[in-house]
Image (spheres, rainbow, N blue to C red):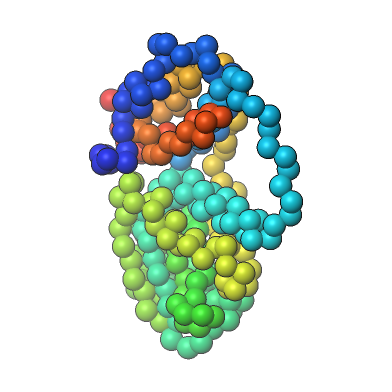
Amino acid sequence: MIRNENTNSLIDRLERLDLTTEISTVAHVTVTFVPQAGKARYMTKKKGGGLANPRPAYDPERNQRDGKKRAIRTMQEIAHAHRLNRFVTLTFAVPTSPSDARKKWSRAIRLKVVKPAGNYVFSLEYSREQQGLHIHALTEARTAQNLKRHWPHGNVDVKTLGWQDIDDVCAYIGKNFADINRPQGNRYYSTRGIKPAKQKMILTSEMRLYDYVMEASDGKEVYSKWMKDSGLGVFGELIWDPYEKSK
């Protein structure tokens, strides 16, 4: 379990919200549950918070940053939901284009000595500006082991991740996702149909958020990953290890 100054138990988090005294100031709570991934993202909107911000003008750089955030968040959800706790880096012995790199990945995971490849998510990255292309992947343990033994194109490095490390590794993989000079193609690639189901809800109070998170986590210990108070409301994410045994 993670226990550091940036991660608090849900009970501590709720105590700081002071649910017993200021419920009347909350207009509603919007929350997105991803139970398979052990995540609940929420926004607590306060009453009398002012008018909505006008729709911003088109900004390509902002769109790239927003796309980066969405891609990293989806990778995190995929990795947690399917327990992809092996961080695999695959290099190429000879210069390789992005399209060829994707073909080599597809051929490698179809090798008899690698199959079944199981679930995975991977991305392409340059070591330096448009040079030194390599693959970062999150896979299951068996897939990582087989790639370590049978990847035919270069070197393989494999690291085992704890539950608390997965989000940080996804952020590391996606660090250049907003760069227009990143390898051509999608920001990431994954097994088809791998995205975990999401449930979006509007709740009437923070106490209802507590109730639904307790139900979704199935008795597992819940933590506050991050929280931000914008003045109009409180944004944050609650997390739990979906593979932890219930108490």
The residue sitting at 27% across, 40% down in the picture is 5
Depicted 109 relative to depicted 127: above or below: above
**In the figure, is residue 111 to the left or right of 89?**
right
Image quarter where the N terminus lies is: top left
The residue sitting at 39% across, 25% down in the picture is 218
The image shows residue 59 at horizontal and vertical percentages of 69, 57
The residue sitting at 37% across, 61% down in the picture is 87
Residue 206 visible to an observer of this rendering: yes
Depicted 216 relative to depicted 23: above or below: below
Depicted 39 relative to depicted 21: above or below: below
Q: Nearer the viewer, residue 23 or 184?
A: 23
Residue 20: name its quadrant. Answer: top left
The image shows residue 109 at horizontal and vertical percentages of 49, 67
The residue sitting at 65% across, 56% down in the picture is 63
Depicted 122 relative to depicted 240: above or below: below
Image quarter where the C terminus lies is: top left
Residue 221 visible to an observer of this rendering: no
The image shows residue 158 at horizontal and vertical percentages of 33, 66
**In the figure, is residue 186 to the left or right of 168?**
right
